[in-house]
Image: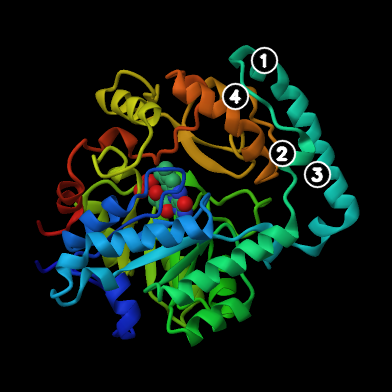
Amino acid sequence: MTAPTSRLAPLPDALDAVLAPPVPVLVAPMAGGPSTPGLVAAVLRAGGGGFLAGGMRTPDQVRAQVDRLRALLADDGARTPSPAARFGVNLFVPDAVNTAIPDAARTPGALAARAEAVAAHRERLTALARDLDAPLPDAAAVTPDPAREREQFAAFLAAAEEQAWPAVSFTFGLPAPAVFDRLAAAGIPAGVTVTSAEEARAGVGHGAVFLVVQGPKAGGHRGTLDPAARPGITDLRTLLSEVRQALRDTPVPLVAAGGVTDAGQVGRLLAAGATAVSAGTAFLLTPEAGTSAAHRTALRQTVAGAAFAHPDDGGAATAVTRAFTGRWARSLVTPFMDEFADAPAAYPEVNALTGPLRRVAAERGDLEHVHLWAGTGAHRIAERDAAVVLAALTPGE
Ligand SMILES: Cc1cc2nc3c(=O)[nH]c(=O)nc-3n(C[C@H](O)[C@H](O)[C@H](O)COP(=O)(O)O)c2cc1C
């Protein structure tokens, strides 16, 4: 397979294995169920790359996923480069260790205002919780504990070292330079998701050795470093060139992500300077993905044009909303997103408040109250094996 790549310079070996697999397409990390060791293994075995999702999991759960992935790939150990050397693990950066949050957002006054906004939002959710017969956690129970966040983040870093993860990608924030130094000392290349040239400069300034450049069409959460910032709308190819320009003195490999569902798009992003292209939504309907039944139903309806259709162009109706989690994320459009469009910028509190509602709704197949993460290409995805989806994303196939 000779897919085009656009590497500026050879990557160090460890990073080369993860970011420049035989097929320059990575399965994106997708927390909340879709990412499974089976999905990542299938893509790696078919020649691509990919990241396991560490978000919304405990360090022990992630360790078990890494073990499982390596066990699934054990038979491929003799292949060079070994698929088992080509995966990474994606970690959420909690507020407590996110250096991109301005000091003004951490003052006692700002934290009290945030708690008040969360409590008011909780009140607004009570009627729906009653209707759905779902529990609504207390406001105090959803307030994050910075000490616990720091402890858990440290446990993830320890797991990365002990299990010698081939690479780490961070999202939801920018850890301190010491974190990148620590992973580098352990031989683990670490990168971060960015959504603007300014964030790219900050990421590399802290020691990121690669960046995931996420464009506005991406499904799921936007990876803005400051959670209160409104994510940009610059299209991915323009964003890539802005990032390359901003990093002209300190270039690092760029993984492009957002709205990619075909090989033509992959080829254009490689030509625009990406080392690899990451796709999430394209893999959501594969049998290997752990996508929930409700999410699958909504995506099938979207593909069939039976629901979630955009009134103007017939594509997928998606929008970026804070209603589900308190952080901007792209979902298929549901009435819940309109009703709670003014949810406060408070992740993980809003996520924890709405979680039980969404779980109850999903169990009942009530799609109106479930987060249905999807990129703008959701109407173009296929219900095929992950290897087949990867082949369809491979330029020159
Ligand atoms: C269901 C779902 C879950 C996601 N979870 C994560 C995550 O845990 N970590 C992360 O960095 N990005 C996450 N993302 C964003 C993806 O990494 C990637 O940016 C996005 O899927 C690219 O856009 P696409 O879905 O149009 O391909 C998620 C996306 C989806 C669709």
The numbered mark, 1 or 3, whose residue comes first in the sequence reads 3
Q: Identify the secondary structure beneath mark 2.
A: loop
User: How many angstroms separate mark 2 from mark 1 (CA)?
Assistant: 21 Å
The numbered mark, 3 or 2, whose residue comes first in the sequence reads 3
Which is closer to the viewer, label 3 or label 4? 3
Which is closer to the viewer, label 2 or label 4? 2
- The answer to whether the residue bearing label 2 lies less than 8 angstroms from the nearest atom of ligand 1 is no
User: How many angstroms separate mark 3 from mark 4 (CA)?
Assistant: 22 Å
Amino acid at pointer 3: Arg
Tell me, yes or no, whether the two marked residues, 2 and 1, touch with CB atoms within 8 Å.
no
- Residue 167 visible (yes or no): yes
Residue 28 falls in image quadrant:
bottom left
* Tally of marks: 4
Which is closer to the viewer, label 4 or label 1? 1
- Figure check: 266 above or below 290: below
- Figure check: 345 above or below 2: above
Residue picked out by circle 3: 114
- Figure check: 63 above or below 112: below
Residue 38 percent across, percent down from the top left:
27, 51
